[in-house]
Amino acid sequence: QVRLVESGGGLVQAGGSLRLSCAASGRTASSYSMGWFRQAPGKVREFVAALSQSGSNTYYSDSVEGRFTISRDTAKSTVYLQMNSLKPEDTAVYYCAAKGALGRVTWSASYDAWGQGTQVTVSA
């Protein structure tokens, strides 16, 4: 079983940047496809980005495409989400997750393990 711990959230002005980290322990991040999701108050959890197990393929939601980048440091067993040109609507709790064998990368139900989340707040 993998344990995931996110960090790097905080308060930033619109147009700014943040980099979220997700450290995996128990099993390495390279053992899984990894995803980032977010949940704003009163809204359902939504897909943000994913990285295939091989590291060859990345996936993004339309709302973050071109602004966010998912990457992985295999040696550190850590997955990152670089967020640029942040907007107030990016405000949410961000979660990283390790995907199981089945299901689409964009579906939260496809993921077996989740971190505790990190708050990102973007002020106007």
Image (tube, rainbow, N blue to C red):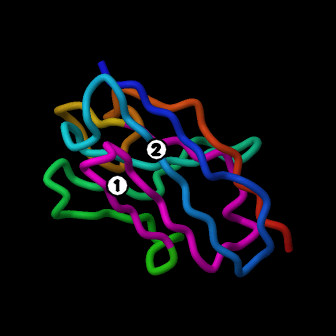
Q: Which mark is residue 50?
A: 1
Asked whether residue 54 is drawn in magenta, I would say no
Task: Look at the magenta stretch and give its main secondary structure.
Answer: strand
The foreground one among 109 and 31 is: 31
Measured Cα–Cα span from mark 2 to mark 1:
12 Å
- Who's the residue at 74% across and 54% down the image? 10
- Residue 88 vs 25, above or below: the answer is below
Q: Which residue bears the numbered disc 2?
A: 22
Nearer to us: label 2 or label 1: 2
Q: Residue furthest right?
A: 124
Element type where label 1 sits in the image: strand
Q: Which mark is residue 12?
A: none
Q: Is residue 16 above or below residue 47?
A: below
Q: Name the residue at 71% across, 73% down.
A: 87
Q: Residue at x 40, y 25 (%)?
A: 3
The amino acid on which the numbered mark 2 sits, given as a three-letter code, is Cys
Would residue 77 be counted in the magenta stretch? yes
- Point out the stretch of residues depicted in magenta: 68-97
